[in-house]
Image (cartoon, rainbow, N blue to C red):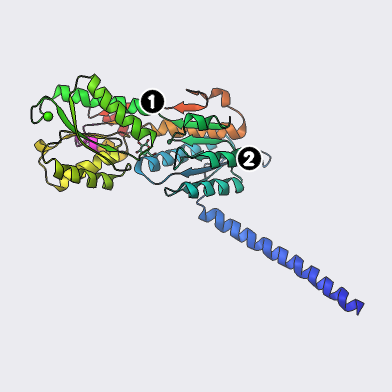
Amino acid sequence: MNEIVQYEIDLQIEMCIKIEVFDMKIKKICLTAMIVSMGILLCACGNQQSDAEEKIRIGVTYYNHDTFLDQLIACFKEKLCELEGSTSEIIVTIRDASGSQRTQDDQVMELINAGCNVLCVNLVDRADPSEIIDLARENDVPIIFFNREPVAEDMKQWDRLYYVGAYAEQSGVMQGELAAAAIWSNDQIDRNKDGKIQYVILEGEPGHQDTIIRTGSAVDTLKKNGIELEKLSGGIANWNRAQAQNRIMQMISQYPNKIELVLANNDDMALGAIDAYKKLNYTESALPIFFGIDGTDAGLKAVADSKLYATVYNDKEGQAAAMAELAVALVVKDGMDEIEFDEDRSIYLPYDKVTADNVEKFLVE
Ligand code: GAL
Ligand code: CA
């Protein structure tokens, strides 16, 4: 009897061990599959490193796809590859939050659980970072917010929160100055010769710092430069080319041949407006004048082709470099002294004006 019990126990122990080994194997397979499916980028830039050195594991989550952001993230990956030659191995995991703050909160948890030792977060809702901040603080993982600026109060929640972006106001002022200079130099823009410029404005997401501030400062700057304005219409197009095309179609049907100036909070929306006029077969001389912001590849090309009068360069290379250098310095705990902050823990890269006269310089960047 005793023997049988003993045998059963042995068998159970043996089975448990097998299950555990099997379980480990499954875990290993799952982990491998996860690493592949998570789209982890291991920079293949060749670099010898001892196991003792801490690997730099960067977790990135961004609000959604859009033209500028996709180009910014591509620059960030490139920059990390360059840096990897001179530092520890870098592993990057990138997540798209598809416009949901809930999803993004979960992604942050998953990135922390996967061992990321620094996070780069492009908030879906810039006014709602508390859950992410709490998670990061509990696990002592610093955060570099980028492009979508948290409000000042939230930046004070913890001293390991950073921001990399640009001064929204500067981009609006530059757009206003570019438009004012164009209007003063060409009296054909005031097509109905009433001494005022009839304009419409296409805006990004409501609540985004680049929407509110760009719109306000572009219009104020035009006025300060002596341009009399008459606003015909405005609409939200969420940075999106197709949405902007739809919006402008409605505005054109409401104000046929009346619009003289189109201000857009970004290039994609300015291009959407140009698409609408093209679709309606407007002749060149009947077109309004268009202004964007970003200097995306398509935006720059449109400036070079004289379709978009001017844009304002949003320095994605500079922002990507600042994020990459900061991320590495935070993990290796070296080089923080060399990083220049514009305010507390924030870095703002300057914008630049782009017209047909200097677009070549930006096209090669
Ligand atoms: C802005 C940019 C837009 C859009 C937005 C997303 O800085 O001009 O095109 O990418 O960020 O947050
Ligand atoms: Ca007019």
Label 1 Cα crowd, 10 Å radius (few <14 / some 14-19 / many 20+):
some
The picture places residue 19, in percent across and down from the top left corner, at: 71, 67
Task: Locate ligand 2 by image quadrant.
Answer: top left
Mark sitting on residue 127:
none
- Residue lying at the far left of the rendered structure: 193
Q: Nearer the viewer, residue 185 or 101?
A: 101
Spatial CA distance of label 2 from label 1 is: 34 Å
Mark sitting on residue 138:
2
Magenta-drawn segment: 302-310
Amino acid marked by disc 2? Glu
Amino acid marked by disc 1? Pro
Query: In percent of the image, x 68 and y 61: which residue is there?
Result: 24
The picture places residue 134, in percent across and down from the top left corner, at: 58, 40
Residue contact at pointers 2 and 1, CB within 8 angstroms? no
Give the secondary structure at mark 1: loop
> 23 left or right of 197?
right
> 30 left or right of 178?
right
Q: Vertical placement of 171 versus 123: above or below?
A: above
Quadrant of the snapshot with the C terminus: top left
Query: In percent of the image, x 9 and y 26: which residue is there?
Result: 194
Query: In percent of the image, x 36 and y 33: which residue is there?
Result: 210
Q: Vertical placement of 122 versus 97: above or below?
A: above
Residue that mark 1 sits on: 350
User: Mark 2 or 1 closer to N-term?
Assistant: 2
Query: Does residue 365 appear anywhere in the picture?
Result: no
Quadrant of the snapshot with the N terminus: bottom right
Give the secondary structure at mark 2: helix
Query: Does residue 166 appear anywhere in the picture?
Result: yes
The image quarter containing residue 285 is top left
- Residue lying at the far bottom of the rendered structure: 1
